[in-house]
Image: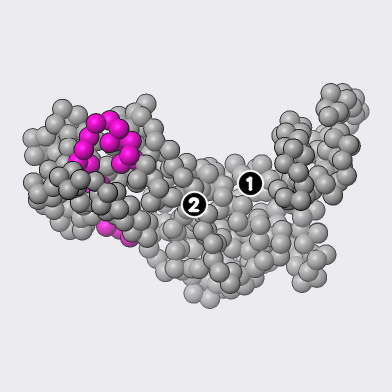
Amino acid sequence: MHLPYLCKSLRTISAYHPPMQERVTMAVLAKSLGLSESTISRALRGDRRIGEETRSRVARAAKELGYRPNPWVSALMSARKNRSGNGEVGTVAVVTDYHGKDGWKTKDVCRWEYEGICRRADEMGYRVEEFAMSDFNYDGHRISKTLIARGIRGVLLGFTRERKFLSGFPLEAFSVAGLSTYFREVAVNRANFHGFHNVQLALHEIRKLGFRRTGLVVPELNNRVSGYLWSGAALDWQRRLPENERCNPLVPTASHEDAEFTEWMKREKPDSLLVYKLPVKSWLAKAGLRIPDDIHLSYLYRTQDEMTEWPGIDGNLPMVGAAAFDLVIEGLHTNRYGLPPQAKEVLIKGEWRPSN
């Protein structure tokens, strides 16, 4: 590689034109590596026709020199391929619907996913703008007219609380993808946390700590939103244990959570709990049980506060947001708009973390 020569050249040029040398182009990368621009372009897209060694060299050079793709060039190339394609791809709209003070911004999970979206947008030379459904009186035509008027063609369906999707929103006009399970009734490509893997990973790690009867305790709503993968993973895990070590999961209904938990504890006799959201610490205190003396506690998708107390799963939620953003950009760069003929889902695996 000729990176030292390139860096020296860049410093020389910047002495005369400091503001103009902020963007490193494919041509610069090609010259520094002694490759053609078409090879650089294919390598950056992960084209398998380019050897792995060359792809790695290009990726390293791009990172070291701060290369970022130009969304305007991508838009031009897309428009050339499809004369009906036009408009600004420099901005991606995140459509949200979340009630309450500050909405989704009060939720750790949402904030982490949004951080991943913004970080990936910055890496790729894009910007992100939120479009709250309530600001448009839940009128899909109004939102779409606004986006089209501004030349925005990328839409990421973001944070919501069980409301049905906008009526009259012409998805065929946009490259659209879904974040996690929000707006899950819309059959778009989406990125999500790997709920089945994460529950089984947690149960495996808890068992390594010496506990033999671990019970999953999660709310009905969230289990349903996961596509019942949480309870399904727990049941599959229990199926493979000796009968005397099996502990059925608890998915209490909202109106009887406390009573159901008390009855479940008496019946299943768990020695440890894997919990999401529910106030099990106060329920255990009412039952006279102490943590960790009487029962062990771990969290599925811990909040920021829970990280300091107990072990659990890090769902890599910024990566979920980044992967969802990638799906939108993939559609923009390949002129794919509207609902896909067969929706795909990118699953991001979580990792086990001890208490901080």
| Residue 286 is inside the magenta segment | no
Q: Residue furthest bottom?
A: 168
Of badges 1 and 2, the one in the foreground is 2
Q: Which mark is residue 347?
A: 2
Residue named by callout 1: 121
Q: Secondary structure at mark 2?
A: strand
User: Quick check: can you spot residue 53?
Assistant: yes
Tell me where residue 40 appears, x and y as whole percent: 81, 44
Tag count? 2
Helix, strand or loop at mark 1:
helix
Q: Which one is nearer the viewer's eye here, 52 or 289?
A: 52
Q: Residue at x 27, y 57 (%)?
A: 220
Left/right placement of residue 22 relative to residue 149 reads right
Q: Is residue 349 left or right of residue 11?
A: left
Q: Considering only vertical position in the picture, is 349 above or below 296? A: below
Task: Residue at 11% x, 34% y: name it.
Answer: 289
Magenta stretch, residue numbers: 202-224
Q: Quadrant of residue 310?
A: top left
